[in-house]
Amino acid sequence: MKLSTILPYGDDPIRNADAVTDMERAGLDVVWAAEAYSFDAVSLLGYLAARTERLEIGSAILPIYSRTPTLTAMTAAGLDALSGGRFSLGLGASGPQVIEGFHGVPYDKPVARTREIIEICRTVWKREEKLTNDGLYPIPLPGGTGLGKPLKIINHPKRADIPVWVAALGEKNLEMTAELANGWLPHVVLPEKIREVFGPALDAGLAKRAPELGPLQITGGGICALEEEMFEPARQAARGMYALYIGGMGARGKNFYNTVFAKQGYADAAKVVQDLYLDGKKEEAMAALPEDFIDKVSLIGPEGHVRERIAALRENGITHLHVNPMTSDVNGTFEKLKSWIS
């Protein structure tokens, strides 16, 4: 089991990145950089590549609509070279609010586009042949000036098999992830519900998976607090985050996070939280999240409780313990968690 965390995208990026060097010494294995409608993740990842030595770095996520597939492949190859082969490409569709509202491009065919982008990236990285593609991303572009021609990336990528992770929520996207990707970045994992909720899609994808990809890697964990004085602030932080996603990330009838929450046994709460949040009653939406849900999707409490939750994650296929620590001693927390999972 590896230990991972994600850098917040709302704070000072230099301060956050500088803190990572201490986290690396404390035993952190993987750090992910987010990209929403924030600073871009690529700039931060390049900085992290220069500041760290052994730490794996990853994008969580690069939205599939905001770059061409070829630029995504070039970017991943560049970050992998700068980091000495420590980069993982995390991809995701994001949502219509961000893609159409901030980037101004249509949000359509997310599963088909993700599949094609992965295939294009791997073709570029292998550098065995000039790049051509038929489908949603025709390469070279038909028509236009008529001057486009197939090309290879000029540089030799450090690795032809840069790991690809996908932030999948829907069944078809998850099936595709289990078939093609190296790893899965779920938003919320209730370990006891993984087989019941996600098992059919995972099994369908794994049945088509190439053996050379190896086992599917999966992140799971949540907000972590081991100090008693941090328990309540951490619970409130978890409530705030999940109320935002379950209630506010989308519209009624079109919220992927709400759908997944409902499927995991909280259908009634899913509707209540969304209605309250969209009506502007954010505090009430936070309070409406069931207590047992917060317990199961976080690592908050005495050491015995947290170790039990880690064991449940491991038993249900989680390979990367992903934590957002709330503590007065971040590095001490990472050292302790690393000792528990080693």
Image: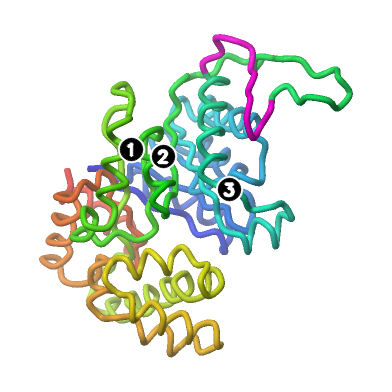
Looking at the rendering, in which quadrant would you find the C terminus? top left
Q: Do the residues labelled 2 and 1 touch (CB within 8 Å)?
A: yes
Task: Using the numbered discs, state the Cα–Cα distance from disc 2 to disc 1 in whole angstroms.
Answer: 6 Å
163 to 183, vertically: above or below: above
User: As rendered, which of 119 and 322 lies closer to the eye?
Assistant: 119
Name which residue type carries label 1: Gly
Callout 3: SS: strand
Rendered-image quadrant of the N terminus: top left
Front residue (pair 308, 203): 203
Residue indicated by mark 3: 63
Query: Badge 3 local density, few (<14 within 10 Å), some, or many (20+)?
Result: many
Q: What residue is shown with label 1?
A: 205
Quarter of the figure with residue 217: top left
Q: Distance between the residues labelled 3 and 1?
A: 22 Å
> What's drawn in magenta, residue-wise?
126-138
The percent coordinates of residue 187 (x first, y second) are 39, 58
Q: Residues within 10 Å of mark 1 (few under 14, many from 20)?
A: many
Q: Is residue 65 magenta?
A: no
Mark 3 or mark 1, which is nearer to you? 1
Gap in Å between the C-alphas at discs 2 and 3? 17 Å
Q: What residue type is labelled 3?
A: Pro
At 32% across and 49% down in the image, what residue appears? 219
Looking at the picture, the colour scheme in use is rainbow
SS assignment at label 2: helix
Nearer-the-camera pick, 326 or 111: 111
For marks 2 and 3, the one nearer the N-term is: 3
Q: Residue under circle 2? A: 176
The disc label shown at residue 340, or none: none
Disc 1 on helix, strand or loop? helix
Badge 2: how crowded within 10 Å, few (<14), some, or many (20+)? many
Name the residue: 24% across, 55% down: 194
Q: Where is residue 188 in the image (x, y as percent from the top left)?
A: 35, 61
